[in-house]
Amino acid sequence: MFRISLKILITVFVVSSFSAHAGIKKRELFSAELPTGKNYKMVTNFVTLTEGQSLPHHIHHGIEFGCIESGLLTLYIRGEKTALLHEGECYQVPNKTEHWANAQENTTLVASWVVDVNQPLMDTRLPAGRSNKTSTH
């Protein structure tokens, strides 16, 4: 518990110190409540997709957030409006929400997940009646 509290304190101090310097601009990209507990970890990856490449229907046992570094990506999130994401745009996928994506051109993004350490990062085991085949619907 002390270790987690110390990390939070250090993070708050660093962010507060960063904000206090004149001339430094920052823009919040997104904010989310994170799962709590010792069974969660944060994973961050550079992801590269070639034009026409797709990610299958899947979920994460935690939240996903990311930003498009270059390219154009169509992101489908079950129950939400489809998003066409351009360079510099960010997204967030809620915990255990089915989603999939298609690269409209060569695309690089930085994606982070806060996920349950006891589950696979990308889980394609979907509820009965749902397919993990890539589609545009």
Image: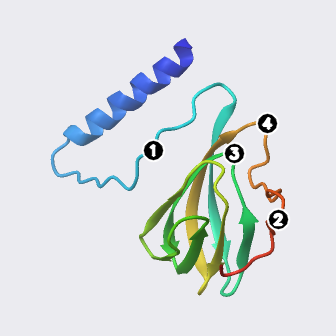
**Sequence order check: which comes first, mark 4 or mark 3?**
3
Q: Could you say which disc has been placed on residue 118 in the image?
A: 4
Q: Is residue 129 found left or right of 22 in the rendered image?
A: right
Where does residue 53 sit, x and y in percent of width and height? 71, 81
Q: Do the residues labelled 4 and 2 touch (CB within 8 Å)?
A: no
Q: How far apart in space, not on screen, are marks 2 and 1 (Cα)?
A: 30 Å
The amino acid beneath tag 3 is: His
Q: Are marks 4 and 1 in contact (CB under 8 Å)?
A: no
Q: Tell me the residue at 71%/77% (across/down).
A: 54
Seen in the picture, residue 51 relative to 22 is either above or below; the reply is below
Q: How far apart in space, not on screen, are marks 2 and 3 (Cα)?
A: 20 Å
Q: How far apart in space, not on screen, are marks 4 and 3 (Cα)?
A: 9 Å
Residue wearing tag 3: 61
Q: How far apart in space, not on screen, are marks 3 and 1 (Cα)?
A: 15 Å
Q: Could you say which disc has been placed on residue 129 in the image?
A: 2
Residue wearing tag 1: 32
**Sequence order check: which comes first, mark 4 or mark 1?**
1
User: In which quadrant of the rendered view does residue 25 lie?
Assistant: bottom left
Q: How many marks?
A: 4
Where does residue 51 sit, x and y in percent of width and height? 65, 87
The amino acid beneath tag 4 is: Asn
**Sequence order check: which comes first, mark 2 or mark 3?**
3
Q: Tell me the residue at 52%/59% (across/down).
A: 66
Q: Tell me the residue at 29%/55% (across/down).
A: 27
Q: What element carries label 2?
A: loop
